[in-house]
Image (cartoon, grey):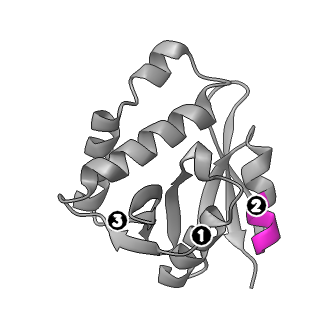
Amino acid sequence: MSGVQILSVTEGNLREAGYVHALSWQESHRSFCTAAFIRRHTPEAQSEHLRREIAAGKQVFLMTAGGCPVGVVSVAGSLIENLYILPEYQNRGYGSQLLEYAIGLCSGAPTLFILSNNARAQRLYERRGFRLTGCRNQITDTLWELEMRLAP
């Protein structure tokens, strides 16, 4: 993982961050969202989403490797969100490195939410020490957001 940089997202790299967010989000949601809903999450739409996140006070970061965009993450207080790695860069340690960076920015116990159908993400976070808190938000009849917090 030589040449890795983690940069604050600004207007200068917002488009790259939106591209990473869109492609990664589309891939991670393809198996349970409609094709029409997936198509709405374009790089332009996700760039606007990230712009709104920044305007709301979140810190948003873009990870690059060898100058190429690889991943994004946002942090607000102790809440970690928008952690996405492009599919072709997954399983290479980039997600873990970006998660560690985000944890280091948290003002309290690092907390995040995962979708209840995302066992892969849950395993990643559990290996890092995160545990389910029991708090959850219902998305649909069969889908929930599950809160995880880094155990002390």
Q: Position of residue 77 (x, y in %)?
A: 44, 75
Quadrant where the C terminus lies? bottom right
Quadrant where the N terminus lies? bottom right
Q: CA distance from mark 3 to mark 1?
A: 16 Å
From the viewer's perspective, is residue 137 above or below residue 80?
Answer: above
Q: Which mark's residue is nearer the viewer, 2 or 3?
A: 2
Report the span colored magenta: 124-129
Q: Which residue is mark 1?
A: 99
Q: CA distance from mark 1 to mark 2?
A: 10 Å
Q: Residue 43's quadrant in the figure?
A: top left
Q: Which residue is mark 3?
A: 58
For the residue pair 47 and 114, the one nearer the viewer reads as 47
Q: Position of residue 59 (x, y in %)?
A: 35, 69
Picture residue at 56% right of the left edge, 16% below the top: 34
Q: Earlier in the sequence, mark 2 or mark 3?
A: 3
Dot 3, how many residues are within 10 Å of its Cα: few (below 14), some (14-19), or many (20+)? Answer: some
Q: Which residue is mark 2?
A: 124
Q: Which mark's residue is nearer the viewer, 3 or 1?
A: 1
From the viewer's perspective, is residue 146 above or below residue 66?
Answer: above
* Amino acid on which the number 1 mark rests in the picture: Leu
Q: Secondary structure at mark 1?
A: helix
